[in-house]
Image (spheres, grey):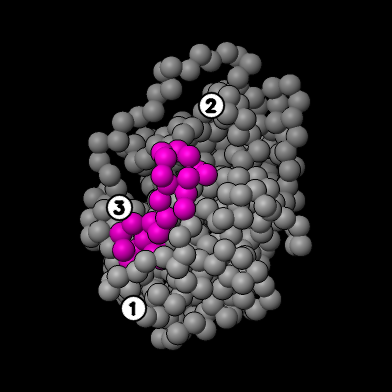
Amino acid sequence: MGCCCKKKNEIYISNKVPLKSEEEQKITQKDFEKVKIIGKGSFGNVYLVRHIKTDKFYAMKVLSKSLIKQREEEYHTISERILMAKINFPLIVKLHYCFQDKKNLFFIMDLIQGGDLLYHLRRYHNFDDEKTRFYISEIILILEFLHSNNIMYRDIKPENILIDKTGHIKLVDFGLSKIFEKNKKMYTMCGTVYYMAPELIKKEGYNCDADWWSLGCLMYELLSGNPPFQMDKKNDVNSLHFDLPVKMDNCFSEEAKDLINKLLVIDPDKRLGSGKDGIQKLKQHPYFKNINWNDLRELKVEPPFIPDINDDTDLKYIEDNISENKNDNINEKDSDFDNYVNFSYYEDSHIECSESQN
């Protein structure tokens, strides 16, 4: 992975991916027409935009440099830019362009119109086994790809899993992802509390096996409508109780119960998915007995739900009435606006999915 280093008002991105020079990449915000806001986050907004020359529609994520600096999130921002530029996998949202102006960073990505899993959970409360099995299986393929390239995702949750117009999922938001070294643990506590593995919360050191715990939490939520663990005190991560085995009612099949219990194991070394051949053992679990993993990976398996999308501006599955985050309460100074050297990107080289995975 590339890295970043910082001088006064400049952040340098070093990257092994061949990139065109800043001068060669003339694309700017003026090349896009904003159509509508479709999301917002801690550092800015996401818009539906139209590329004026090609008439293609994209999602444009805009991040405030000032907010990034104030919250000391430069490293995670640069990590996301580098990782998304390198990754090419059919179930992961694709980065097409990056550029910047004085105040903001811009990511131009695939427009995914089918809504996220949280939106659909709110509509239906919970999913049946057919839907859950399909989505969990595709997430397993994503994590297999990422882990095989020494990338830990660290933020599996319904909001980060979108459904495209064909019904397949697209994983988004790599701001907390990290390149890991084999046999070396990480200690940064990050992610979303309800999906964090115990070893991550307790700062005992963790590796990519923490992603399998998050997968177990997600699967439980898809089937029941709620995460498996709750906090006694709001915003107090230490009040999160890992009461195992988790209670599961009749909306869980016996095979689903067994799989969740094997993913939600306190000891990461004993968690299903961990260790040598761990992913293959996970794929061989009876819950997936009817899954053809090769067909699934080649997107040949028909999704259980296909969004009814009329055109590129159809946003019926995306929450309406989203207010723009104007950052009006931020006292911005010129010193807040770092120049991210080599931030610009045109889609070029990627980590390709390997045909050896099955």
Note whether 336 is above or below 231 in the view shown.
above
* Mark-to-mark CA distance, 3 and 2: 27 Å
| Label 3 Cα neighbours within 10 Å, binned few <14 / some 14-19 / many ≥20 | some
* N-terminal label among 3 and 2: 2
Q: Are marks 1 and 2 in contact (CB under 8 Å)?
A: no
Badge 3 is on which residue?
A: 119
> At 59% from the left edge and 60% from the top edge, which residue is drawn?
210
Mark 2, secondary structure of its residue: helix
Quadrant hosting residue 342: top right
Residue nearest the viewer, comparing 269 with 105: 269
* Mark-to-mark CA distance, 1 and 2: 45 Å
Note whether 206 is above or below 254 in the view shown.
above
Note whether 319 is above or below 86 in the view shown.
above
Label annotation for residue 67: 2
Q: Magenta stretch?
A: 218-241
Badge 1 is on which residue?
A: 253
